[in-house]
Image (spheres, rainbow, N blue to C red):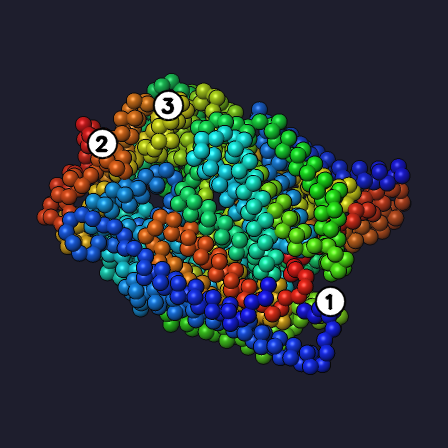
C-alpha cells in the first residue's frame, strides 16, 4: 500500500523497492518455513515419544487431503474477495446424495458424479442468488448454511433412521492412499493450471485487490463469480466423494467443521483472507498439511493431561496468529486493515 | 511494530524446537501397581465429555484405576460423528495404544475394523452392539466385547420409571426426549419404554399403537415425539421437549410452555435435572430421570425436585476394563465358541434421599464397588467365562454392597 | 417538519408493527396464542435483551468493516471466569456480575490490542482469538460444565422480567451516550466513513479500535451472564469454533436495525430488530414448528430482507411507476423512500 504523505528521493526509492521485494519474498516463504518447522517438530516429538511413524504419516495424509482439496477450490472464491461459510454443509449434502445414489446403483462412478454435480449446483445457487439479487455473498452463504442443514436432515429421514450408510467393505476397498493422491493430485494440478496459466487467476486477483478498477476495465464480475463458485463446487464434490469413502456412515453432524477448518487452513498457508494480488493457489496445500502436522504433534504431546485438548487449542491459536502476522508483514500501511 | 523477518523466522523455529523439548521433558504419567514394566496404554473414545456422568466415569478410570493398575488412560475429544471417531482412532493407533475402550457409537463397525487392522484390542463400555454387528465381529480376536445396558434394559428403565409415577397416582406427564432428534438409541428406547408403560392402560395409545415395537417404529420414523399423537382418557401428555438448544429463543419458549402446562411429573430420558432444574424451582413438578449418581442429583433429590433416578453408578465400567486388560496381558475372556463378550448391566434405582445417599456413598471414584480386589481375580488369570458372566450379572446394589 | 417526523415515525415502526400483526394473525389462524404461557413476557424481554446486545456487539465492529467471530467465545469465557471465581470465593450474584463484565471488557480490549498490534485482517484475528478463548475456557474447567443449578441467588437474576428491562434500558443509554454524544463516538463515525481523512485529522485510530472491541466485550459478557443465570450452568468445553453460532442469530436483527436506524436512531433500530426476531421465535414455538422449519424460516427471512435492502432503488422505482400508472396518490415510497440517517448499510454488507 502506498503511503501518499511521505516523499522519497531517487536512491531511497530504489533501495525501498528492493527491500520491499525482499520482504515480499520472505513473507511468501513464511508459510513454507512454518510447514518445515512443524514437520521437524512432528518428527522430533514422534521419535522421542516412540510414535508409530509410518502409520502417523499415513494418518497425516488421511486427515489433511479432504480439507486441502476443498480449500484449494475455495481459494477461487476467496481470491475475489468473496466469502463462503457454507462449504461444510455443501460437503455434507453432496456426500449424502452421493451415498444415496450409490446405494441405489452400487457404482463408484455414480457416487463420484452425483457428489460433484450436487456440490456444483449448490455452489452455483449461492452465486446466482448473490449475483441476480445483488446480495452480499457472505450473508447469502450464511442463509445457505441453514438451508443445506435442513436439506441434510430431510435426506437422513428418507432412510427412516439417523444415518445414511454405504457398504463399508466397498468403502474400505477404495479408501486408499493411491485414490487420495490421485484425486488430490488431479484437482490441484487443474486448479494450478486454471489459476496461474489461464486468465481466470489474474482476473480474480484484480477483482479481489481492486474491485472498482476491475469493473471499470470491463471485466464481468458475475461471470467470474460463477466460474469461481463452480470450481469451488468441484472441489467440494471431490471432498465429499472422499468423505463418503473415509467414513461410510453419514449423520447430520458429519463435515460441519469443514467450513472453519478450510478458513484456518488457507490462512495458515499464507492466503490473504480478502483475496487480491497475494493469493497463492498452493496456500491450501501448505496450510492443510501444517494443520494436520500441528494436530498430530499436539495429540502426541498432550494426550495424558485432562485439559490437554484446551491447551492444544491455545497453542494452535497462538501459532495461527504468529503465522498470519509474519505472512502479512511488509504489506502494512499507516492505517489499520479492514 | 517492526520486527525483522530473521527474528520472526527464528521465533518460529524456537517455537518448533520448544514443542520438541516439551515433548521430551514432559513427565511420564504415574502408574503404580503390580510389577514393573511399561504401563499398558489404554485409550478411551468418548462422545460425551462434559456431563457429570461422563466426568464420574473418567475420574474412576484416571484416578482410581490408573493408580491401582499398571495402565495409563488417554481420552479423546468429545466425538460428534464417525469422522471424528476415525480421526481419534488414527491418533490412538499412531500413539501405540494397546487397547481402545469406546463410549462413542456413531460407527462402531468402523472402529472395530480399524482396531483389527492395527492389531490392537477394542471393547465397548456402557453399551452393546446391535445383533448384526455382533454377528459380524464376534469371532474377531481384536474385539473383546461389550458390557453395558442393552437396549432392552434401556426400555425397561423407561418403563419402570413411568410405572413408578403411575403407581404414585400421577396422571399428567411431560417428556424430555434428550437426544431423540440425533437418533441416540438409548434415549429413543427409554422414551418408547415410558410410552409403553402408559399404554398399558386400556384407553391409552401413542400413534394408535400400544406395543413397544410399534411405538418404537413410530418414533424412529418421526424422529421426534408428537404430543398430538398421544391419546388417553386417563393420562395427559402435556408437553414434550428434546435436545439442548439453550441459546435458541424458540426452544426456551417451548421449555417454558412445558413447565407452564404443570405436569405432575417430567419423565426425562437423560440430564433431566440439568435441563429443567432451574425452570421448575418453586413449583411442585417432580422430575424422573435416567442419569447418574452425582452430587448435583443428590442435591436435587434433597430439594424435592428429583423424585426418581435410575442411574449408572460411577464404577460400572470396572468389568469391561478388567476384560480389556486381561486380553492385553494374554488371557482374554471369551464366550462360548471363542466369541466376544456380550454381557448386560443395569441401573441402580433410587426413589428417596436416603437411598440416593446410600448409593452415592457406596460407590465413589475413590472407593468404588468395583475395586481392585473385586476385579483382580479376572485379570491375567484363567478365570472362566461363566465365572466372569456371573460376576457381571451381579450388578445391583444389593448384590454388590448388600 | 410535520411530514418529516411522520415519515420518521412510520419508517421506524412499520416493520415491528407489521411483524406483530402478521404473527398474531398467523397464530390465530392456527388456534394458538402468541403469548401462551405465564412466562411469555419474561421470555420476550430476555430474548430481546440477549439478541439486542449481541446485535450491538456485532454491529459496532462490523460498521468499521471488522468482522468478529469471537463474540460467542468472549461471552463463554467471561461468564466462566465470573462463575468460577464466584463459586470458589462463595460470593453472590453481584460478584458474579462484576467479575463477568470486567473480564468481558478485558477480553475485548485484549482482542482489540492483538488486532492493533499485529495489524492483520480483523476477521482472521478474530478466528485466532476465538480459538484462544475457547481453549482457555476448556483449560480452566478441564472441559466440564460450570454448574450452579441450585444456587438460587445466581439463577434468579434471569428469571425476573424487570431485570431484563433494566439491562435493555442501561445498554441503550450507555450505547447512545457513548456512540452518539461523546467524542469517542464522533471519532468512531469519522473513522467508519473516512478512515484516511480522520487519521490525518488526528483521530487516534488504534485507541478507538481497542475501545470499540472492549465495548463489544462488555456487551457479550452481559449476554454470557444472562445465559449463565438462565441455564444454571455454562458449557465451557466447546472447542473448534463451537461458539461461533451465536453470531449468526444476530444478523437479521442487525440488518433490520440498520434499516430502521435510517429513520431514527440505530440503537433503537437494533432494539426493534431484536424485538421482531424474538417475536418470530415465540410464534414458531407457539405453532410447534420443528427446528428445521424454524431455521429455514429464519434463513428465508434473512435472504428476503437482504434482497429488499440490496434492491431498494429498483423496488422503489418499480413501485413509483406502478402507483403513478394506477392514478397517483401517496405511495409507500414517498413516505419511506427518503432515508435521512447518516449510516448507510452498504458498509455493513461487505465482509
Disc on the earlier residue, 3 or 2: 3
* Residue C44 visible to the viewer: no
State the image coordinates of residue A115 (x, y, percent, origin top left): 49, 62
Name the spot of residue B362 as percent of width and height, x first: 24, 30
Q: Is residue B250 above or below residue C204?
A: above
Depth check: A99 or B388 in front? B388
Q: Is residue B111 above or below residue C162?
A: below
**Secondary structure of residue under mark 3:** helix
- Residue identified by numbered label 1: A212
Q: Residue C124 appears at what percent x and percent y?
A: 57, 58
Quadrant that contains the C terminus of chain C: bottom right
The answer to whether mark 1 and mark 2 are in CB contact below 8 A is no
Front of the two marks 3 and 2: 3
Callout 2: helix, strand or loop?
loop
- Could you confirm whether marks 3 and 1 are on the same chain? no
Q: Which mark is residue B302?
A: 3
Give the Cα separation between the discs numbered 3 and 2: 23 Å
Q: How far apart are the alpha carbons under marks 3 and 1?
A: 69 Å
* Chain of the residue under the numbered disc 2 shown in the image: B
Q: Callout 3 environment at 10 Å: few (<14), some (14 to 19), or many (20+)?
A: some
Residue position marked by numbered label 2 in the rendering: B396
Does A56 sit left or right of B323 as displayed? right
* Mark 3 chain: B
x then y, percent, for residue C120: 59, 61
Residue drawn 35% across and 41% down? B54
Is residue B72 shown left or right of residue C311? left
Q: Quadrant of the N terminus of chain C?
A: top right
Q: Give the distance between the C-alpha atoms of the residues marked 1 and 2, in whole angstroms.
A: 75 Å
Label 1: few (<14), some (14–19) or many (≥20) C-alpha neighbours in 10 Å: few
Amino acid at each position: 500500500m502506498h503511503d501518499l504523505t511521505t516523499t522519497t528521493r531517487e536512491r531511497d526509492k530504489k533501495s525501498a523497492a528492493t527491500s520491499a521485494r525482499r520482504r515480499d519474498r520472505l513473507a511468501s516463504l513464511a508459510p513454507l518455513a512454518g510447514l518445515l518447522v512443524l514437520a521437524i517438530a512432528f518428527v522430533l516429538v514422534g521419535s522421542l515419544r516412540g510414535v508409530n511413524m509410518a502409520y502417523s504419516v499415513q494418518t497425516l495424509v488421511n486427515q489433511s487431503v479432504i480439507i486441502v482439496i476443498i480449500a484449494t477450490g475455495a481459494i477461487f472464491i476467496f481470491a475475489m474477495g468473496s466469502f463462503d461459510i457454507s462449504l461444510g454443509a455443501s460437503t455434507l449434502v453432496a456426500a449424502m446424495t452421493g451415498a444415496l445414489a450409490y446405494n441405489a446403483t452400487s457404482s463408484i462412478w455414480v457416487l463420484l458424479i452425483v457428489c460433484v454435480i450436487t456440490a456444483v449446483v449448490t455452489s452455483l445457487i449461492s452465486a446466482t442468488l448473490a449475483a441476480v439479487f445483488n446480495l452480499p455473498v457472505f450473508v447469502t452463504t450464511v442463509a445457505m448454511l441453514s438451508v443445506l442443514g435442513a436439506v441434510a436432515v430431510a435426506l437422513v429421514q428418507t432412510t427412516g433412521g439417523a444415518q445414511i450408510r454405504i457398504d463399508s467393505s466397498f468403502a474400505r476397498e477404495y479408501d486408499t492412499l493411491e485414490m487420495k493422491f490421485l484425486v488430490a493430485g488431479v484437482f490441484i494440478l487443474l486448479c494450478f493450471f486454471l489459476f496461474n496459466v489461464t486468465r481466470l487467476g489474474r482476473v480474480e486477483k484484480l477483482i479481489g485487490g481492486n474491485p472498482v478498477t476491475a469493473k471499470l476495465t470491463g471485466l464481468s464480475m458475475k461471470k467470474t463469480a460463477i466460474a469461481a463458485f463452480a470450481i469451488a463446487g468441484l472441489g467440494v464434490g471431490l471432498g465429499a466423494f472422499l468423505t463418503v469413502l473415509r467414513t461410510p456412515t453419514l449423520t447430520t453432524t458429519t463435515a460441519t467443521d469443514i467450513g472453519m477448518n478450510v478458513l484456518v487452513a488457507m490462512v495458515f498457508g499464507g492466503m490473504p483472507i480478502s483475496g487480491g494480488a497475494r493469493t497463492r493457489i498452493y496456500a491450501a496445500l501448505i496450510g492443510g498439511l501444517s494443520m494436520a502436522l500441528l494436530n498430530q504433534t499436539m495429540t502426541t504431546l498432550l494426550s495424558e493431561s485432562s485439559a490437554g485438548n484446551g491447551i492444544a487449542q491455545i497453542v494452535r491459536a497462538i501459532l495461527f496468529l504468529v503465522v498470519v502476522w509474519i505472512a502479512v508483514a511488509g504489506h502494512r500501511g499507516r492505517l489499520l486493515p479492514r | 511494530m517492526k520486527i525483522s523477518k530473521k527474528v520472526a523466522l527464528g521465533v518460529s523455529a524456537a517455537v518448533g524446537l520448544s514443542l520438541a523439548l516439551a515433548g521430551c521433558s514432559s513427565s511420564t504419567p504415574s502408574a503404580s501397581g503390580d510389577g514393573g514394566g511399561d504401563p499398558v496404554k489404554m485409550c478411551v473414545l468418548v462422545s460425551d465429555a462434559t456431563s457429570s456422568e461422563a466426568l464420574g466415569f473418567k475420574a474412576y478410570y484416571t484416578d482410581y484405576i490408573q493408580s491401582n493398575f499398571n495402565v495409563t488412560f488417554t481420552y479423546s475429544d468429545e466425538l460428534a460423528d464417525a469422522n471424528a471417531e476415525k480421526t481419534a482412532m488414527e491418533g490412538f493407533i499412531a500413539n501405540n495404544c494397546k487397547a481402545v475402550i469406546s463410549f462413542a457409537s456413531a460407527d462402531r463397525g468402523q472402529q472395530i475394523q480399524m482396531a483389527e487392522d492395527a492389531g490392537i484390542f477394542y471393547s465397548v463400555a456402557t453399551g452393546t452392539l446391535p445383533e448384526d454387528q455382533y454377528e459380524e465381529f464376534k469371532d474377531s480376536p481384536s474385539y473383546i466385547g461389550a458390557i453395558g445396558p442393552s437396549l432392552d434394559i434401556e426400555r425397561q428403565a423407561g418403563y419402570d420409571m413411568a410405572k413408578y409415577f403411575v403407581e404414585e397416582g400421577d396422571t399428567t406427564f411431560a417428556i424430555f426426549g434428550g437426544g431423540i432428534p440425533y437418533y441416540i438409541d438409548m434415549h429413543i428406547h427409554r422414551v418408547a419404554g415410558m410410552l409403553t408403560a402408559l399404554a398399558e392402560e386400556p384407553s391409552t395409545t401413542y400413534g394408535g399403537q400400544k406395543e413397544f415395537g410399534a411405538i418404537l417404529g413410530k418414533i424412529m420414523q418421526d424422529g421426534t415425539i408428537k404430543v398430538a399423537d398421544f391419546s388417553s382418557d386417563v393420562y395427559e401428555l402435556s408437553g414434550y421437549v428434546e435436545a439442548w438448544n439453550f441459546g435458541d429463543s424458540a426452544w426456551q419458549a417451548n421449555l417454558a410452555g412445558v413447565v407452564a402446562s404443570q405436569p405432575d411429573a417430567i419423565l426425562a430420558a437423560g440430564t433431566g435435572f440439568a435441563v429443567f432444574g432451574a425452570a421448575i424451582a418453586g413449583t411442585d413438578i417432580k422430575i424422573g430421570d435416567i442419569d447418574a449418581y452425582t452430587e448435583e442429583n443428590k442435591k436435587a433429590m434433597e430439594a424435592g425436585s428429583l423424585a426418581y433416578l435410575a442411574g449408572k453408578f460411577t464404577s460400572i465400567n470396572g468389568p469391561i476394563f478388567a476384560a480389556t486388560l486381561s486380553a492385553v496381558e494374554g488371557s482374554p475372556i471369551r464366550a462360548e465358541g471363542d466369541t466376544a463378550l456380550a454381557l448386560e448391566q443395569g441401573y441402580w434405582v433410587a426413589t428417596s434421599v436416603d437411598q440416593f445417599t446410600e448409593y452415592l456413598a457406596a460407590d465413589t471414584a475413590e472407593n468404588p464397588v468395583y475395586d481392585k480386589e473385586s476385579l483382580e481375580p479376572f485379570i491375567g488369570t484363567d478365570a472362566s467365562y461363566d465365572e466372569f458372566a456371573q460376576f457381571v450379572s451381579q450388578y445391583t446394589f444389593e448384590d454388590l454392597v448388600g | 417538519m410535520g411530514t418529516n417526523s411522520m415519515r420518521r415515525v412510520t419508517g421506524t415502526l412499520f416493520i415491528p408493527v407489521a411483524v406483530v400483526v402478521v404473527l398474531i394473525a398467523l397464530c390465530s389462524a392456527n388456534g394458538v396464542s402468541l403469548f401462551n404461557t405465564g412466562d411469555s413476557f419474561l421470555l420476550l424481554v430476555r430474548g430481546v435483551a440477549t439478541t439486542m446486545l449481541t446485535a450491538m456487539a456485532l454491529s459496532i465492529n462490523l460498521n468499521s468493516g471488522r468482522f468478529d467471530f469471537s463474540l460467542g467465545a468472549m461471552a463463554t469465557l467471561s461468564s466462566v471466569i465470573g462463575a468460577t471465581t464466584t463459586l470458589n470465593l462463595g460470593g453472590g450474584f453481584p460478584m458474579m456480575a462484576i467479575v463477568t463484565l470486567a473480564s468481558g471488557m478485558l477480553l475485548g480490549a485484549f482482542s482489540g490490542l492483538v488486532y492493533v498490534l499485529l495489524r492483520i485482517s480483523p476477521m482472521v484475528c478474530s478466528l485466532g482469538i476465538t480459538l484462544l478463548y475457547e481453549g482457555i475456557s476448556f483449560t480452566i474447567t478441564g472441559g466440564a460444565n460450570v454448574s450452579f443449578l441450585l444456587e438460587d441467588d445466581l439463577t434468579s437474576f434471569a428469571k425476573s422480567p424487570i431485570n431484563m428491562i433494566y439491562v435493555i434500558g442501561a445498554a441503550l443509554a450507555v450505547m447512545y451516550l457513548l456512540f452518539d454524544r461523546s467524542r469517542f463516538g464522533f471519532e468512531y463515525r469519522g473513522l467508519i466513513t473516512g478512515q484516511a481523512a480522520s487519521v490525518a485529522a488526528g483521530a487516534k485510530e488504534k485507541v478507538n479500535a481497542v475501545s470499540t472491541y472492549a465495548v463489544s466485550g462488555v456487551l457479550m459478557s452481559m449476554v454470557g451472564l444472562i445465559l449463565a443465570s438462565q441455564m444454571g450452568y455454562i458449557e465451557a468445553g466447546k472447542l473448534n469454533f463451537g461458539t461461533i453460532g451465536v453470531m449468526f442469530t444476530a444478523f437479521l436483527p442487525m440488518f433490520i436495525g440498520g434499516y430502521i436506524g435510517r429513520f431514527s436512531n440505530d440503537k433503537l433500530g437494533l432494539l426493534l430488530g431484536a424485538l421482531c426476531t424474538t417475536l418470530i421465535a415465540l410464534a414458531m414455538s407457539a405453532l410447534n414448528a420443528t427446528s428445521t422449519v424454524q431455521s429455514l424460516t429464519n434463513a428465508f427471512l434473512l435472504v428476503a430482507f437482504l434482497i429488499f435492502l440490496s434492491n431498494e432503488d429498483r423496488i422503489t422505482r418499480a413501485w413509483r411507476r406502478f402507483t403513478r400508472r394506477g392514478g397517483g396518490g401517496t405511495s409507500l415510497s414517498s413516505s419511506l423512500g427518503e432515508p435521512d440517517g447518516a449510516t448507510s448499510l452498504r458498509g455493513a454488507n461487505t465482509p
